[in-house]
Image (tube, rainbow, N blue to C red):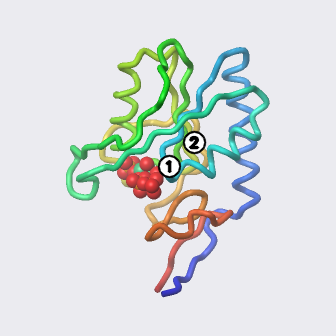
Amino acid sequence: MDVNIEVLIPEQDIRDRIQEMADALSERYAGENLLLVGILNGSVFFLTELAQRMSIPVEIGFMAASSYGAGTTSTGRVLVTKDLERSIDGVHVLIVEDIVDTGQTLHLLTEMLLERNPASLELAVLLDKPARRKVCLDADFIGFEIPDVFVVGWGLDYNQKYRDLPFIGVITEE
Ligand code: PRP
């Protein structure tokens, strides 16, 4: 069944904002070895655009996680289904994500990665939905703050579809 999708953030606004984030990150990590860690699947579109627009060399790696209890409890759990294949001991790590919603996924992944002694660990997200937060989590680099609406595009899906939309859209009806 087709759905109706309205543009919330136009494509050019997103690309311009990612360029600003890339500039800030290139300055922040100048002269350092930086590993971008994308959380599958949602992070891939934002991560590749961000990496291509940064002016410093970066390494990339991926993790995958499934969260449980996110809708009903403030103590959700995250199952890591794909881990990094390298040590991050002494490495500057930037987690790259499409969205922070309740914050549970990134809170738990951050705790897990901090135990591995990175040189630094920061978080860059394209979208922040603070109205939904259940745990204390502040991203270091944020693209856009959005209201509590269901969004698709730039990695965000509706029943696994629409991740590839080049704008952020809101599903308004079926
Ligand atoms: C989404 C998103 C974050 C998480 C945010 O992933 O990519 O990882 O949810 O939600 P939270 O802040 O409430 O934890 P999802 O589990 O939908 O998987 P996907 O990336 O494959 O779409």
> Looking at the image, which residue is at 27% across and 58% down?
71
Helix, strand or loop for disc 2: strand
Q: CA distance from mark 1 to mark 2?
A: 7 Å
User: Could you say where residue 53 lies in the image, as x and y percent from the top left?
Assistant: 76, 40
Q: Is residue 86 left or right of residue 66?
A: right
Tag 2 residue? 142
Q: Quadrant of residue 142?
A: top right
Q: Nearer the viewer, residue 167 or 39?
A: 39
Tag 1 residue? 128
The furthest residue to the front: 85
* Amino acid under disc 1: Asp
Helix, strand or loop for disc 1: strand
Does the residue tagged 1 have its C-beta within 8 Å of any atom of ligand 1? no
Q: Nearer the viewer, residue 141 or 34?
A: 34
Q: Is residue 86 left or right of residue 164?
A: left
Is the Cβ of the residue at disc 1 closer than 8 Å to that at disc 2? yes
> Looking at the image, which residue is at 46% across and 86% down?
174
* Amino acid under disc 2: Ile
